[in-house]
Amino acid sequence: MARLDGRVAIVTGGARSIGAAFAKGLAAEGAKVVVADLEPADEVLGVIKQAGGEAMGAETDVTSENSCKEVVSKTVESYGRLDILVANAGLWVHLERQAPTEIDVDTWEKVMSVNVKGVWLSAKAAIPEMLKNDYGKIITVASTRAMKGGAGMLHYDASKGAVIGLTRSLAREYGPSGICANIIAPGATDTEISQSLATQTQKERRLASAKARAIKRAEEPDDLVGACIHLASPESDFMSGQTLVVDGGAIVW
Ligand SMILES: NC(=O)c1ccc[n+]([C@@H]2O[C@H](COP(=O)([O-])OP(=O)(O)OC[C@H]3O[C@@H](n4cnc5c(N)ncnc54)[C@H](O)[C@@H]3O)[C@@H](O)[C@H]2O)c1
C-alpha cells in the first residue's frame, strides 16, 4: 500500500517546476491530485496518468476567492473529499531584482497578492472540507530567503516571511480539529524556466549558493518531494507549525 492511498490533494501552481514535482510525487504515493494553476497542466497530468496515477487539472487563480472555492468544489465533486493542500503557487522567477528603493507599489502588491493572499485564500477554501473529516494537511512553500534575507527581492522575502507566520497561525487554529499546517522552505532551486531565463550573473550566483551548502550541488525540484510526501502523510500527524528547510544544508538550525 502506498503512503497516500485514498487521499486527495490539491497542488496550486502545479503545472510546472516545483509544483509539478510535488504533484507527481503525491500521485506516485497513491493520492488523487488536482493540479490548480493559471496555466494548463497537460504535461504533468500526462506524466501522472502514464505512470498509472489519477489526476486532473483545474484552471485556478489563487488571488481570487471564487476561483479557490471553485477548485475545492470541483475536487470534492470528482474525488469525494479533500485531505491535502499544497499551497505552492508563487511569483518568483519573473521578478526583476530591484533595490528596496526601486520596487514600485504595484509590484509589491502583486507579489503579496499571489504569495500571501493566494496562500490564505487557498487554505480558506480548503479548510471547511478538511473539517468535515477532522483531518487535513496544509503544506505551504516559503523560502530560505525569508530566514537569511538577501539583496534585490525585499517584496518576495517579506511575502515568504508572511507565509511562515500565517502557516503557524493555521497550525494553532486548526490543530484541535486534526489539521496540520507546515512549511517547506526551499533554497534556490534550479527549474527548467529559471535555467532558461538565467543571466550570467544569476548562473554565477547559483554556483556560489551550491558551494555554500553542506551538500555541494545545485538544488532541483525533486529534492523537495520527500519533504512534501512526509508532511502530507500520516507519518507527520504529530507535526504542525514547523518549517522544514530543504536546501542541502546551507542553513543549519
Ligand atoms: N525555484 C526556486 O528557487 C524557489 C526557491 C524557494 C522557494 N520557491 C517557491 O516555490 C514555489 C514554486 O516556485 P517555482 O520555482 O516552481 O515557480 P514557477 O514560477 O516555475 O512556477 C509557479 C507556478 O505557479 C503558477 N501561478 C502563478 N501565479 C498563480 C496564480 N495566481 N494562481 C495559480 N497559479 C499561479 C504558475 O503558472 C506556475 O505554474 C513558489 O512559491 C516559490 O516562491 C522557489
Image: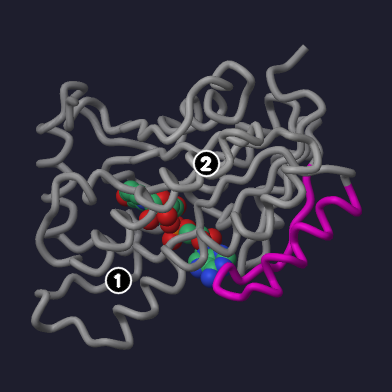
Coloring applied to the structure = one colour
In the picture provided, is 23 more to the left or to the right than 155? right
Question: Residue at label 2?
Answer: 139
Q: Residue at x 34, y 40 (%)?
A: 185
Residue 61, above or below 177: below
Instruction: Please state the extent of the stretch shown in magenta in the rendering.
Output: 55-78
In the rendered structure, which disc, 1 or 2, sits on the residue that comes first in sequence?
1
Residue 143 at what x, y percent from top left?
31, 47
In the picture provided, is 245 more to the left or to the right than 25? left
Question: Residue at label 1?
Answer: 95
Figure quarter occupied by ligand 1: bottom left
Which type of secondary structure does the marked residue at label 2 adopt?
strand
Query: Hey, which quadrant is residue 68 in on the image?
Result: bottom right
Q: Is mark 1 within 8 Å of ligand 1?
A: no
Q: Nearer the viewer, mark 1 or mark 2?
A: 2
Residue 171, above or below 198: above
